[in-house]
Amino acid sequence: MLSGTTATAVAVGLLTSEDGRILAERTDPQTINDSMALTIQCVASVSNMGRHLYVRNYEVLALCSQVTILQRLLKDNKKKVRELKEENKGLKKLVDSYANDLVARSTEQSKTTIELQKQYEKLLVEVSHAKTPSSSSQANTFTPRASLIRYWNNHISNNLPKPLFLFSKASPLNAQNSAIFTNLATQNSLSSHFHSFCSLANLYCSFEDDHPLTQVSDKSDKKYNNAGKTGVPTGQKKYRDFANIVYRIAYDKLINHGNDTFKKYGKRLVGRGIGGSSKLDSGSSVNRWVEPGSFFRESMLKGGNVMVMPDIKDRMPKRSFLPQAILSKLPFSTLRLSELKGIFHVRENSSMERMLVNALAECERAPSLGESKQCVGSVEDMIDFAVSVLGHNVVVRSTKNVNGSKQNVMIGSVKEINGGEVTNLVSCHQIMYPYLLYYCHSLPKVRVYQADILDVESKAKINHGVAICHLNTADWSPKHVAFLALGFSPGQIEVCHWFYENEMAWTTAD
């Protein structure tokens, strides 16, 4: 502490006039000194606090400056993140554009070479009939149909002419497109190239809700009928043009080995939309929804006979098989329906969804007793199934065209397949699906015929048909549509029918 005089002088300088007045009344020097000392200490404390506050103020300002800098950095980082996201979107668009550009370019290239390719393949088929080492070595390994020919040669043991009608259903994709879509299927990215895939692969990817075939396949719609189960609804005239599809698919599908399938089938048909009377004993009542000529007796297949040819035109949309490489990458199971819907852009509760569900259910249905069955989406798969049932020495036949449909025709030259012996058959029918899908199954105890179809007036050949006769009908229901048409009972007659457009009959080669 300073001396009393100095302290007094300092204190006097610090004191206010009011303090001076109060202290003037005090006479005790010690008291005055103590008071002034306390005042000085308070002043010093206040000064210290002021300095601390001043320092703190600078620290706070520094922290605020740092916060401002951090906020600016955060803002810059957010901007950079947005820029990176936009850049990623741009890159994705660029990649998609590049992929689509590749597909478009390959499409353009394929269009410019398709005619030459067809001519080459025709020559290749003709040359391949000889199956000599020199001819096979000249095959273009990059031609899909040439690859099919090699597959046929490796799996079929006879030298008969190749079935061009079967090869024509092969995928139109060239090697480049096939590789692109195979890669996309492997990466589960086909959905993003849906339109180009459907167009280039010749698929049918847009089922309209009012399409007749989708209505027939809708099991939940009581107005219409499951294929072959309940026939065509009375009064629905616009559906009559595909009644042949309804009956021939279900008819052939359910004619297998003797079991109660036939009895149940007949019960489902009678009284549920097939129209007309169900009298069978007299054979005089024929169901008006059974198209004339759909069923006939074996004795009608004689040269010179005149009979009605049913409408054998294929009413399903034109599609192609898929290459095995792509087909193997696609889901085909009810358990993976959601994946299928994603690939083909299928809406919920749409006709296309019902079509997928019904096709998968039919293909997953357990085979009947003694039946072999398989749904095939490629030519190679169909060959494999036929060979597994009949062996390697097989041939496939189909009715040549639709000429003579819905009119009287004359039977010309008739050929009995396998010498007219009772034989086994693999029958293949289309199923409605985005790509070409066939339901193939075995049929026992049949006779198969080929017959020239002639114009009744000019006697000119207008078609070449394939017919099948089921010899054992004892286990069929008495109310089966065949008996409604022919007027007999089970076991009394054989039942024959034509193979319609695009249906296929596989037998052992003669």
Image (cartoon, rainbow, N blue to C red):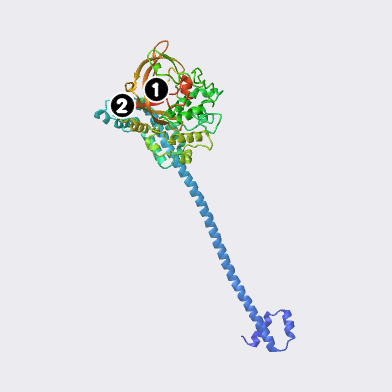
- Circle 2/circle 1 CB separation < 8 Å: no
Residue 282 to residue 261: above or below:
above
- Please state if 14 lies on the left or on the right of 55 as rendered: right
Asked if one can make out residue 424 in the rendered structure from this viewpoint, the answer is yes
- Of the residues shown, which amino acid type is indicated by label 2? Leu
- The answer to which of 49 and 486 lies nearer the viewer is 486
- The answer to which of 357 and 43 lies nearer the viewer is 357
Whole-percent x, y for residue 13 in the image: 67, 80
Asked if one can make out residue 377 in the rendered structure from this viewpoint, the answer is no
Q: To which residue does mark 2 refer?
A: 124
Quadrant location, the N terminus: bottom right
- Please state if 441 lies on the left or on the right of 136 as rendered: right
Q: To which residue does mark 1 refer?
A: 469
Point out the residue furthest to the top here: 457
**Label 1 element class:** strand
Whole-percent x, y for residue 4 in the image: 65, 87
Residue 102, image quadrant: top left
**Label 2 element class:** helix
- Of the residues shown, which amino acid type is indicated by label 1? Cys
Whole-percent x, y for residue 278 in the image: 52, 22
Other residues around mark 2 within 10 Å, as few (<14) / some (14–19) / many (≥20): some
Instruction: Give the alpha-carbon distance from disc 2 to disc 1, as whole Å.
Output: 36 Å
